Image (cartoon, rainbow, N blue to C red):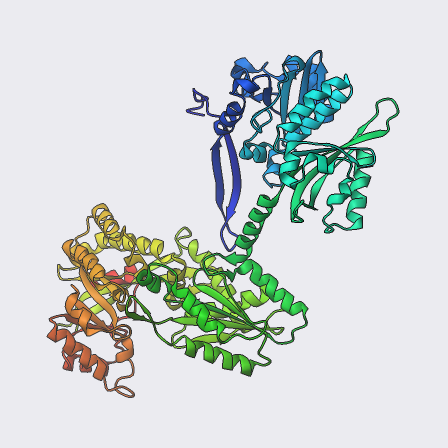
Amino acid sequence: MENGEIEVPYKPTIRISTPIYSSDNVYQGILSVNYLAQDILTTISKQYGDSSYSFVKPALINDKGYYLCNIDSNKNFGFMFQDKKDNTIAIDDLELWNEMKSKKTGYYENGREVSFFMNVNPLTTIGVKSEYDYSWFILYKFNLDDLPVVQKNTFFGMNNRELFMLLGIALLTLIIVIINYYSKKDKEELNILSKISENINEAVVITDNNTVITDVNNSFEKITGYRKEEVLGLKTRYFKSGKQSVEFYKDMWESIITRGYWSGELWDKRKDDFLYPKKLNIYSIRDNSKGDIIKYIGIFSDLTEHVEEQEYVEKLKNYNLKTNLPNENLTNRLINDIIKDNKNNFSLIYFSIENYNNILLKANNNNFIKELIKRTRTLLKGEDFIAQITKNNFVIGLSSCDSREEVGHFINKFFNENKKSFNIKKEEVFFNIKAGISVYPEDGVTSEELIINAYIALENVLNEKGNKYIYYKPNLKIKMEKEIKMDTMLRKAILNNELNVYYQPQVDIEKEKVVGAEVLLRWENEELGNVSPVAFIPLAEKTGEIIEIGYWLIERVFKDYSLMRDKIGTDFRISINISPLQFKDEKLVYKFKEYAQKYNVDFKNFEIEVTESIFMTNVDGVNDKLNKFKEIGLTVAIDDFGTGFSSLSYLKKLNVDKLKIDRSFIKNYPEKDGGEIAELVTDIAKKLKLKVITEGAETKEQVNYLKSIGCNLVQGYYYSRPLNKADFYKYISK
């Protein structure tokens, strides 16, 4: 539809829609995929475009009787147009339409014209279950006088596999319909059918009522390797593979005798004794007068290629093709099989390569995983296995360890083995691995429970410094559930107006003057109460929500600035923390400019604080971005200096203005800390001509010490705790 009108030329569309949920089962919206139905119609038209098959008149009809595809294209999609509402098969041929609705599948004779029809459910055909009885009719019409001998190994041009799959057209069923039709006619006319059977890809075998073979076609010879004269007079059981049970054949013959046909897959034997799978349809032909079975007709195709495809699909379902390791699907089965074998001691190690992406950048491929697999396999015994769950997450299943102590020995060997370096392009590289461990049956009695609980342990250890692995404990699951709940609420925090901006004054202790403030984020939730930034900021970093929150914060601060502009001087700096994740966002500088223009902000009153962790991967790239901030007038401070990377070499390269000494280097002064690191950082800053500020000063004694070592900028509770906007205005007005 275009502006409420049907587009001309019209574009028939198939639309598939499904609701989308997040990993925590929160409804996100609806995904709709639109597929141009014209592609299907074009395919159908091509099949019958050749004049050799022009005697066939195909049609696709919906369950209301409207043509979706017809020889007369003017009749297509009549339901869409007011002036075409009469373009239905019910109006063209009511008796045929009634026959189609009552029988679903069959043929209808009107003089010399024969119609074959089949009801198909396109959703079922593609493996989709639906509560709606949604179906189409496929209709073929042909005149008996026009029926040609078919050549080129096709029948009615139906050699398009995609069309078969999509519409579920059973070509051979049509042949049987014609055979049934001709069985009522002059038997000489069956010669036409024999010519047809000689020129199709499927094998045809005809037997008497005792299953003795009386005729076969060319395709039978090609598929089985037997010549026609070799099999005439043989019974069909001669080709049995021995793979099917007596019950299988009993059910098959019961269907043939009671229903008149059987369809299924089985294994048979070629002339060279090679077993092959085939799709077989068997039909019984009865005498019209007595109703006795006089013949059987079998039509089959070789499924060897199909089975090979299925085996490939099966491998896709169960293995990572790049590493040939079991994937999550097969891992579940392996674990459950081990549990069924009454293994009393089974442990699962779920581990992750934290520096996977960094190694991948150096290697330009994932061949380095082979090194990890090789190392791990040297430690495995018996039914132990290693599997790959995602690109950088793996599972080790341990059946060979009879106690936690033995598991401990194994995990220590595992980490010691992977401490060893390996070379990529003549450069030494190390795996940075962390792991979570679950033990059967204490931590789960199914594969799902063991995998989930080991993963929960891994998620917890990923956030810890120093620890390489931890065992699952129930409190870890409670912690994660709380985290998931908190994440759900945090995603709504902006919408629910739960976030607030606080300002902590920064003071020049030499001049006793407020010269700036650090912006701090606070979250107050109705259910959770006041949530500590220590809890929700790392969570926002982990989920990526920090980017949206960060932009909300920048805009809110710029808006606040427009109200406090008159109360601050030109040398006053409002400092905004930028998370490592947000720093990588390409829109960051643009957003600063956008909000500055919106609120008439002077960048000279603003400073960004970045942590040392952003310099660890690409110092030059980081510096390029810092230069863009400097160009628009912002100053740059390195936050928490001394707690992270702390390489002095990058300080000389980076275009920064200030070092911020972490509160951990002053909070215990003078009782447990002599303040040496604070003094050292201050001296470094002076040598590099950088400003230096210390956060966390809480006592007069600490402030005096900082003044004595030349650190004159101080932020801490001694002067003020973080203040809301109104209180901060009052504070700077004094």
Asked whether the viewer can see residue 132, the reply is no
Query: Which residue ends up furthest to the top in the rendered image?
Result: 111
Pinpoint residue 307: horizontal percent, then vertical percent: 60, 47
Query: Which residue ends up furthest to the front in the rendered image?
Result: 229
Q: Quadrant of residue 673?
A: bottom left
In the depicted structure, whether residue 46 falls above or below residue 412: above
Pinpoint residue 157: horizontal percent, then vertical percent: 56, 26
In the depicted structure, whether residue 578 falls above or below residue 400: above
Pinpoint residue 626: horizontal percent, then vertical percent: 19, 59
In-front residue for pair 241/327: 241
In-front residue for pair 568/733: 568
The quadrant of the picture occupied by the C terminus is bottom left
In the depicted structure, whether residue 516 falls above or below residue 106: below
Pinpoint residue 68: horizontal percent, then vertical percent: 56, 23
Q: How many dots with numbers?
A: 0
Q: Quadrant of residue 249?
A: top right
In-front residue for pair 384/14: 384
